[in-house]
Image: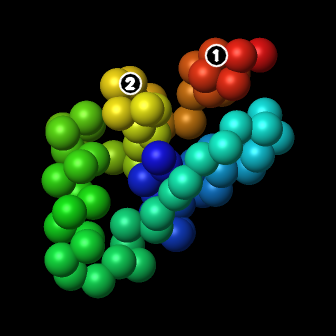
Amino acid sequence: MLYALSTCGWCKKTKEYLRELGVAYRYVFVDTLSEPDKSEAVAAITAWNPDCSFPTIVIDNNRCIVGFNAEELKKIAGK
C-alpha cells in the first residue's frame, strides 16, 4: 500500500518507479480523502511512520519504506 499526496513529486516518482519495476500495488492520495477516511489513513501511516511523511509504503503489513528509496523498492520487486 502506497500512502501518497496528490501534490508530492516524490510520491509521483515512487508510483512511476513501482510501475517500471512491475510491482503490483494499491495507493491512496491521503490529501484527497474526506473524513473519517483521512483520519484512518493517517492512523495507519503513523503506526509505521510516526512522522507521517510521504510517500510511505507498507508491504504486506509487515514492512515499511519511508520516502523514495530506489534500492529498497528494487528489493521488494526482487530485482
Where is 38 relative to 45, above or below?
below
Please state the horizontal and vertical placement of residue 10, each as a whole percent of the image.
Answer: 58, 49
**Coloring scheme used:** rainbow
Please state the horizontal and vertical placement of residue 2, each as a whole percent of the image.
Answer: 49, 49
> Quarter of the image holding residue 66?
top left
Where is 23 relative to 75, above or below?
below
Q: Is residue 74 left or right of residue 54?
A: right
* Residue depicted at 60% across the width and 47% down the height: 25
> Quarter of the image holding residue 74?
top right
The residue identified by callout 2 is 63
Screen quadrant of the C terminus? top right
* Residue depicted at 46% across the width and 57% down the height: 4
Where is 43 relative to 73, above or below?
below
Q: Are marks 1 and 2 in contact (CB under 8 Å)?
A: no
Q: Counting other residues with Cα less than 10 Å from the Cα at mark 2, is it few (<14), some (14-19), or many (20 or more)?
A: few
Mark 1 residue type: Lys
- Among all residues in the image, which is located at the extreme right? 20
Nearest the viewer among 40 and 11 is: 40
Q: Residue 75 has which mark? A: 1
Mark 2 residue type: Arg
Nearest the viewer among 45 and 6 is: 45
Please state the horizontal and vertical placement of residue 43, each as a whole percent of the image.
Answer: 17, 53
Q: Is residue 1 left or right of residue 47?
A: right
- Among all residues in the image, which is located at the extreme bottom? 34
Report helix, strand or loop for mark 2. strand
Residue 28 visible in the shown view: yes
Measured in 3D between alpha carbons, the distance from the residue under mark 1 to the one under mark 2, in whole angstroms, is 12 Å
* Residue depicted at 18% across the width and 67% down the height: 39
